[in-house]
Amino acid sequence: AAQEGFDPAEVEGDLAAAGHGPLPVLAVVGRPNVGKSTLVNRILGRREAVVEDRPGVTRDRVTYEAEWSGRRFKVVDTGGWEQDVLGIDASVAAQAEFAIEAADAVVFVVDATVGATDTDEAVVKLLRRAGKPVVLCANKVDGPSAEADAAMLWSLGLGEPYAVSALHGRGTGDMLDAVLEALPEAPAQTFGATIGGPRRIALIGRPNVGKSSLLNKVAGEERVVVNEVAGTTRDPVDEMIELGGITWKFVDTAGIRRRVHLQEGADYYASLRTAAAVEKAEVAVVLIDASESISVQDQRIISMAVEAGRALVIAYNKWDTLDEERRYYLEREIETELVQIQWAPRVNVSARTGRHMEKLVPAIETALAGWETRVPTGRLNSFLGEIVASHPHPIRGGKQPRILFGTQAGTRPPRFVLFASGFLEAGYRRFIERRLREEFGFEGTPLQISVRVRE
Ligand code: GDP
Ligand code: GDP
């Protein structure tokens, strides 16, 4: 009954049009105040996103979906990343380095009225080394008289500088045409599409939780470094490690092993590293120091993995140090601080003694299985039909929004699209998620549920 009036072929078409395949990723990088956020807003065709006039305003990395000339892509706004911890050069470089890793193409924004600075030159070096397509945006060219400033930027050796005024929209069309030419149709790093080869694990957690100890413990003598790029100190290194008879790829372990070399700004840098590792992985193993209170930083690291849509395992380390009292309080903390990720498999380990190392692999496999679960459309809809009948949405303004039809648009992680006759409140969406988990498992995976309103 839930399917009444719906043509599955039409729904499939809707999903394709809505871009439910993976989209290529464009990163916008550059020094603070060159106009990155203004440009991103311009690309998105709206103005409400925050643009502030101060350097160093802390904002999180944000990804938007954009469209130009009928093609859809994602835009990563690195504007407003925290600048003060590392010093300007290092933080801009780190930001660009991260963005390059995650992107399929890069827009490098330079303030044409200022010209190329040493910091800009440093970013150019990184861009060149990475070999990703780059479109050079000479920004703040508000009128014809500033065109000459833009031409000066040929000196950066990145090809044609596109003279743009992000503020007024001047020249952005030509620049976006160049962006579309630079962007591949589908992302190169579609982690979801890469089947075969060892599964990729990101071992993450705040400093001192025991990541390198755990890595050493599980690696034993078997460790093989597979991806060391010579000549640089900060390149990611992946290691193949055999566990439970299976070979796994631990991504970006350089960030773990080299932590001793990082001095000030280490936390900030570590967080960029974490994001980059998560980006490359299929499953994140978040290590938590069980001997200490669960911190905001632990939660932020977990959020990174969940928001990136990766499978998740939580490992409570240093279990050898816990007395009965701490164990009691730990359970209380888990109940209050980590209630949103109750679905993640949990292991209590000790990297020092080797306790429960053998439980790691089953937990990882469980999470990956949940991540790849697909519910057939027929089963999903009989389940949704039952929910609608037994737990209808509350009546709002005399109307009762109803779920009409649902489909699973993808896996890794599972993504659902629900078609409804009206807006579904957050509480009801959470209820649906909870019921989906009860019914179909999904252990160890975030779920993405979007709702389309049909008149
Ligand atoms: P971000 O730090 O690189 O993200 O830079 P913002 O987008 O926050 O812009 C920094 C400042 O430059 C703001 O005051 C913007 O209004 C201004 N700005 C950005 N683009 C342009 C432009 O094309 N022309 C002019 N005149 N100002 C601009
Ligand atoms: P990382 O910064 O996350 O890589 O953490 P390390 O592996 O360097 O560990 C930080 C400290 O915690 C070191 O002194 C380790 O010896 C200690 N440590 C790591 N795992 C355990 C464990 O399971 N039990 C105990 N007692 N100490 C541990």
Image (tube, helix red, strand yellow):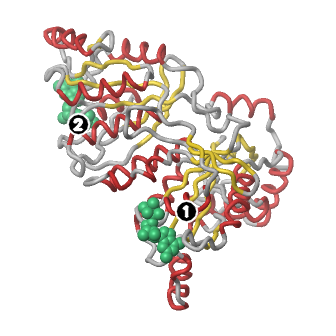
Q: Position of residue 282 (x, y in %)?
A: 62, 46
Q: Position of residue 443 (x, y in %)?
A: 71, 61
Q: Residues within 10 Å of mark 2 (few under 14, many from 20)?
A: many
Q: Quadrant of the C terminus?
A: top right
Q: Position of residue 450 (x, y in %)?
A: 62, 47
Q: Residue at x 83, y 43 (%)?
A: 4
> Left of 384 or right of it: where is 401?
left
> Please, what secondary structure does the residue beneath circle 1 have?
helix
Q: Residue at x 74, y 50 (%)?
A: 246
Q: How far is the residue under mark 2 from the one under mark 1? A: 38 Å
> Please, what secondary structure does the residue beneath circle 2 have?
loop
Amino acid bearing label 1: Leu
Figure label count: 2
Q: Position of residue 50 (x, y in %)?
A: 30, 42
The foreground one among 409 and 394 is 409
State whether residue 121 appears in this view: yes
Q: Which residue is mark 2?
A: 32
Quadrant position of residue 238: top right
Q: Residue at x 81, y 55 (%)?
A: 385
Question: Residue 332 has which mark?
Answer: none
Quadrant position of residue 227: top right
Answer whether labels 2 and 1 touch (C-beta < 8 Å). no
> Left of 434 or right of it: where is 171?
left
CB of mark 2 near ligand 1 (< 8 Å) = yes
Amino acid bearing label 2: Pro
The foreground one among 244 and 281 is 244
Q: Residue at x 24, y 46 (%)?
A: 83
Quadrant position of residue 28: top left
State whether residue 299 appears in this view: no
Identify the mark nearer the N-term, 2 or 1.
Answer: 2
Q: Is residue 321 positioned above or below 99 on the image?
A: below
